[in-house]
Every structure is written in structure tokens, then in C-alpha cells.
Amino acid sequence: ENPFEEHEVLGRNILLETPIEIVAKKLWYRGDRATPRDLLDLALVIEHHHSEILDHSDVFAKNIEAFTEQCGSRRATMLPAFDEIEKIEFKLSFDECLDRANSLKADILKKSIPTHSSS
């Protein structure tokens, strides 16, 4: 699957990374060092691309547990920075974003558990 989409910007065609690619890289390379911005970005992408994220659950599974654990345990220090992020047409609170990330984590973990068929 192509990690880029072509868009016209100021009359020129350019390639931009897809939202899934952006958050996948954030979680893969630094998911064990959660930031408020990463939580917001992940929640926004979950809102619009949940099923596509699950299609690439192996990438997201690497650090999703560490990421959600850090966001939960560091809530008091992350919340002020989260609230300072300029958000356009995005009204979810820190806790609502964390709920989305935790729901995604549960879905990823469910998907990674092998099912046994009875033969």
C-alpha cells in the first residue's frame, strides 16, 4: 500500500504521507516516549481510519501498550501541554483521546490473539 497521497498545493502536485503512515511512524519509532501531540494525532486518525489501522495492526502493536500506559500514568504532566495544542475542528479532551487509544489497543490485542478452530 502506498504511504503517500498526491495533493495539489499552490498549483503544484506534491506527495504527502498518509495520516496512517504518520501515526504508524510515531508509534513505531517513539511510541515508548508518548507526547501529547502524538496522542491527539493518533485519536484523530483513529476517528477517520480505524479499520485501516487494524489492517496494519502489526506496526501499531509494537508500542501501543507502552504508549497508552505512559499517557495514563503521565496524565497530570501531559494534560497542560495537550490543552495548549491549537486544535482546528477537533474537540476531544485528553481523556477522550486516551479512551480512543485504549480502545484501539484492545482491538489490536484481540486481533493478535490466535484463534483455534476445532477440527
Image (spheres, rainbow, N blue to C red):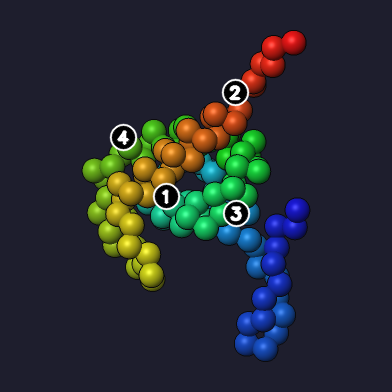
Q: Nearer the viewer, residue 76 or 101?
A: 101
Residue occupying image coordinates x 61% and y 39%: 57
**What amino acid type should be assigned to the residue bearing mark 4?**
Ser
- 14 with respect to 93 (left or right): right
For the question of whether residue 81 can be seen, the reply is no
Query: Judging from the image, what secondary structure is the residue with disc 1 in?
Result: helix
Q: Mark 2 points at which residue?
A: 113
Q: Name the residue under label 3.
A: 20
For the question of whether residue 45 can be seen, the reply is yes
**What amino acid type should be assigned to the residue bearing mark 2?**
Ile
Badge nearest the viewer, 4 or 3 = 3
State if disc 4 and disc 1 touch (CB < 8 Å).
no
Q: Name the residue under label 1.
A: 39
Residue at the front extreme, as displayed: 119
- 17 with respect to 30 (left or right): right
Query: Judging from the image, what secondary structure is the residue with disc 2 in?
Result: loop
In the rendered image, residue 27, in percent from the top left (x then y), is placed at 54, 44
Q: Name the residue under label 4.
A: 73
In the rendered structure, which disc, 1 or 4, sits on the residue that comes first in sequence?
1
State if disc 1 and disc 3 touch (CB < 8 Å).
no
Question: What is the crowding at mark 3: few (fewer than 14 residues within 10 Å), some, or many (at least 20)?
Answer: many
Question: What is the crowding at mark 2: few (fewer than 14 residues within 10 Å), some, or many (at least 20)?
Answer: few
Label 2, label 3: how far apart the Cα atoms are: 23 Å
Label 4, label 3: how far apart the Cα atoms are: 25 Å
Question: What is the crowding at mark 4: few (fewer than 14 residues within 10 Å), some, or many (at least 20)?
Answer: few
Residue at the top extreme, as displayed: 119
In the rendered image, residue 7, in percent from the top left (x then y), is placed at 67, 76
Label 2, label 1: how far apart the Cα atoms are: 25 Å
State if disc 3 and disc 4 touch (CB < 8 Å).
no
Query: Judging from the image, what secondary structure is the residue with disc 4 in?
Result: helix
Residue 62 position (above or below residue 37):
above
In the rendered image, residue 67, in percent from the top left (x then y), is placed at 45, 38
